[in-house]
Amino acid sequence: MQDDRATIRDFVLRHVKDQELSDDQNIFASGYVSSLFVVQIVMFTENTLGVPVAEEDLDIENFLSVSSIHDFVTRKRNAPAY
């Protein structure tokens, strides 16, 4: 099974024009996707990676790049349950 970073990278690459996208590259600033793509990323994060995205998580910083999405998912999975 692929690790989360590879799964995230594959998802993002299906939606961007540049197949040379680095994991740290800001996909929104690069003009590869529109701001509406964040909705798709949130749905992907919840449905594919199984990580719920709460209202307080809806900070664009969590979804700017493959690395930021991966870091967000890792933080959420490692957060203590309340």
Image: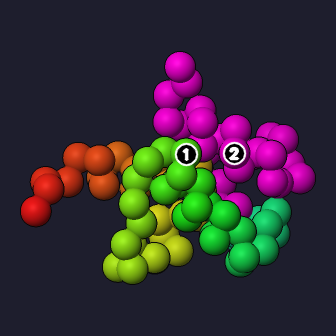
Residue occupying image coordinates x 70% and y 38%: 10
The answer to the question of whether label 2 and label 1 lie on touching residues, with beta carbons closer than 8 A, is: yes
Answer with the quarter of the image where residue 58 lies: bottom left
Residue in view at x 79 percent, y 67 percent: 33
Whether 43 is among the magenta residues is no
First to last magenta residue range: 1-27
Q: Please, is residue 63 above or below residue 3 in the view?
A: below
Coordinates of residue 45 in the picture (x, y in percent): 52, 54
Report the mark closest to the observer, 2 or 1.
Answer: 1
Please give left or right for residue 24 compared with residue 55 in the image.
right
Residue 79 in view (yes/no):
yes
Q: Is residue 23 left or right of residue 72?
A: right
Mark number, residue 36: none
| Total marks in image | 2
| Residue 67 visible within the image | no
- Vertical order, 6 against 44 (above or below): above
Residue 74 image point, x, y percent: 35, 46
| Residue at the spot of label 1 | 48
Front residue of 64 and 54? 54
Residue at disc 2, secondary structure: helix
Say few, some or many: other residues with alpha carbon within 10 Å of mark 2 (under 14 / 14 to 19 / 20 or more): some
- The numbered dot on residue 11 is 2
Residue 62 vs residue 77, the one in the foreground: 77
Quadrant where the image shows the C terminus? bottom left
In the displayed structure, 40 sits above or below 69; it is below
As shown in the figure, which amino acid type bears the numbered disc 1? Thr
Q: Position of residue 32 (x, y in %)?
A: 82, 63
Specify whether 21 is left or right of 56.
right
Place of residue 48 in the rendered image (x, y in percent of width and height, measured from the top left): 55, 45
